[in-house]
Amino acid sequence: MPNSSLALGIDLGTSGVRLAVLNEHGKLIHTSTADYPKGLEIPEDWKTCCTELIRALPTNLRLALRALAVDGTSGTLLACDHTGTALSRALPYNLSCPEQRQTLISLVSHGEPASSVSSSLARALRLISTHGQSVLLRHQADWISGWLLGNWCWGEEGNNLRLGWDLVNQTWPASIAETAWRAALPEIVSSGKVLGKVAPEQSQSLGLPKQLLVVAGTTDANAAVLTANAGPDDGITVLGSTLVLKRFTEGPIRGAGITNHRVGGRWLCGGASNAGGSVLRQLFSDTELKELSRQINPEFNSGLMLRPLPGPGERFPIDDPTLEPQLTPRPVSDSLYLHGLLEGLAHIELQGWQRLKELGAPPPKQVISLGGGARNPQWRRLRERILGIPVKTCTNPPAAGVARLALQAISPQHNLVSTKQESDQQL
């Protein structure tokens, strides 16, 4: 059967770029990766990797592309001129700008996504102080989308929450809208909106179809969730350096530590614990984690009561900046200790789903796991026993998730929230 309506996803990660191509049925048919030559802070590296990967696509796939969408690391921000030329290195998502603390207090209420000194807004203030007020401030995914369009005016809503965008009221707060640098901010569009056709220059340079649509993407974290193809009764848990819980809901939910996004027209809500895989890697090597996990019998309790936080403070499911880790007592057996740590993480996950239920989110009937920890079968079974619901694993890359946004734009019947049967078939 010839390829007729393919969708391309471009995932701009912390270390490189990954492409994914989906066919009209949402099946992953191609994926490829390229590492940044110099690093995340070099915008030209983003273009270099995208160019290399797109040109390397098999010709029959490249010419059958009908839409593409881009995700990027949420918070990685750059200053560019109105032709899209980067004026300096990008400021990465994990860069803190403590010198902007007082200005932030005057612009954003405490607790909002943009109020932290590690927010995009803090980095934006630093860029403006360096380059002046006539620049354009664009996040990683928005800048690459602009490059493909030949138009840098747009910004996708999820990528700009930490810059101050008010998702519920669909506006910039007055305190930001009235600043002298307001024109530096993007025109915000919803995730999944068709922005236009690929620019003729990029069509020719990259060998892309002239009618190829560029669709507003999302953040890398949301793209990872989308790749799970979650059904209406599914929860999604990302087992990475931190433990992240997400699920689609009918509307936003309110509570300390809760994040609300809109992805492809649907609300995606959840929270992130400070606990997660980063704690395990402080204590064990990857080889040790793999070997010790094999020695765990997940059908039994460890007898330990551990809270595997990397340091004092928790944000979800408990909002307590003084909450202390509980990493002792440490038994003689390393496998028993790892058993207790994994059990502790599973109990935090259970508390997270219970917290979301308290705030109005329907409880999941099954959980789909993503991230490095999802590949651990003993942890999967242990979590399944503690959560009391089935736990499944998804190994598709985030690029496949953002490709689903592009596919929805050309095939509206391809809903981002699948039926349970469709979800089960793709795991």
Image (tube, rainbow, N blue to C red):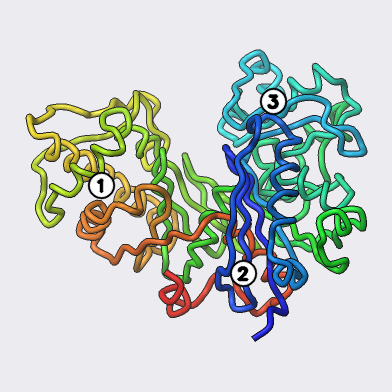
Mark 2 is on which residue type?
Leu
From this view, report whether residue 25 is shown above or below residue 121. below
Residue 277 is left or right of residue 168, and the answer is left
* Tags 2 and 3 touching, CB below 8 Å: no
Sequence order check, earlier mark of 1 and 3: 3
Secondary structure beneath dot 2 equals strand
Q: Of tags 1 and 3, which is closer to the observer?
A: 3
Secondary structure beneath dot 3 equals helix
Inter-mark Cα distance, 2 to 1? 36 Å
Residue 321 is left or right of residue 113, and the answer is left
Inter-mark Cα distance, 2 to 3? 35 Å
Residue marked by disc 1? 347
Residue marked by disc 3? 123
Mark 3 is on which residue type?
Arg
* Tags 1 and 3 touching, CB below 8 Å: no
- Give the residue displayed 86% in from the left and 62% down from the top: 197
Mark identifier at residue 22: 2
Residue 341 image point, x, y percent = 22, 39
